[in-house]
Image (cartoon, rainbow, N blue to C red):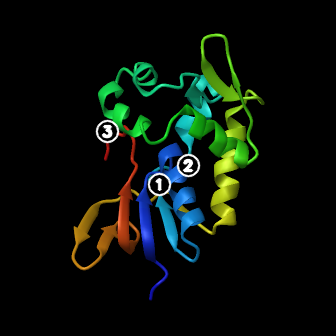
Amino acid sequence: MNNNNYNTIIIGGGAAGFFTAINLAEQSQNHKIAILERGKDVLQKVRISGGGRCNVTHAQFEPKPLSRNYPRGEKELLGPFHSFMTGDTISWFEERGVELKIEEDGRMFPISNSSQTIIDCFISLARKHKIDILTSQNVASIEKTDHWKLKTKTDTFTSNNLVVAAGSSPKV
């Protein structure tokens, strides 16, 4: 087994990629997980979200009205919001030491008013669960045989499972 062989590889070092990796690691001990990020840094959109304060969610506790806060994904998010809602998000972060507050307009931010709080939470949990965070790994090709084979400019990775959490990058 080479160093680049994983149980699960997640393409995308943003909030979705970290959230997926952390939840998977918490449910599956000894599951070797890697996050591949094409950029030099992870969680860059989290850093700038909400003017640097990180708008985590919206204080709306019913799926249909909540989905209206996301005009580019309103229809697509309605189904997932029936499984994981605002209350779940609040609980997830509070259980991991991050308290959120509600602003007058309903947006929710960490009480620290700093996106760094969310970044620190994700990074520390990834380290705790020994998730490999690999930057400057732009995936150039993906093959599926009995496993997934991903090639970047510098490395080849294999994995039993693949999650694409690459967000809105036009380069994906």
Q: Which residue has dot 1 on it?
A: 37
Mark on residue 42? 2
Q: Are marks 2 and 1 in contact (CB under 8 Å)?
A: yes
Among the two numbered marks 1 and 3 on one chain, the one whose residue lies closer to the N terminus: 1
Amino acid type of the residue that numbered disc 3 sits on in the rendered structure: Pro
Seen at 29% across and 76% down, the residue is 147
Q: In the displayed structure, does residue 115 sit left or right of residue 132?
A: right
The 10 Å Cα crowd at callout 3, few under 14, some 14 to 19, many 20 or more, is few
104 in relation to 62, above or below? above
121 in relation to 140, above or below? above
Q: Secondary structure at mark 3?
A: loop
Q: Which residue has dot 3 on it?
A: 170
51 and 54: which is toward the camera: 54
Per the model, the C-alpha gap separating discs 1 and 3 is 14 Å
The 10 Å Cα crowd at callout 1, few under 14, some 14 to 19, many 20 or more, is many
Seen at 39% across and 23% down, the residue is 64
Image quadrant in which you'd find residue 29: bottom right
Q: Secondary structure at mark 1?
A: loop
Q: Secondary structure at mark 2?
A: loop
Seen at 43% across and 59% down, the residue is 10
36 and 91: which is toward the camera: 91
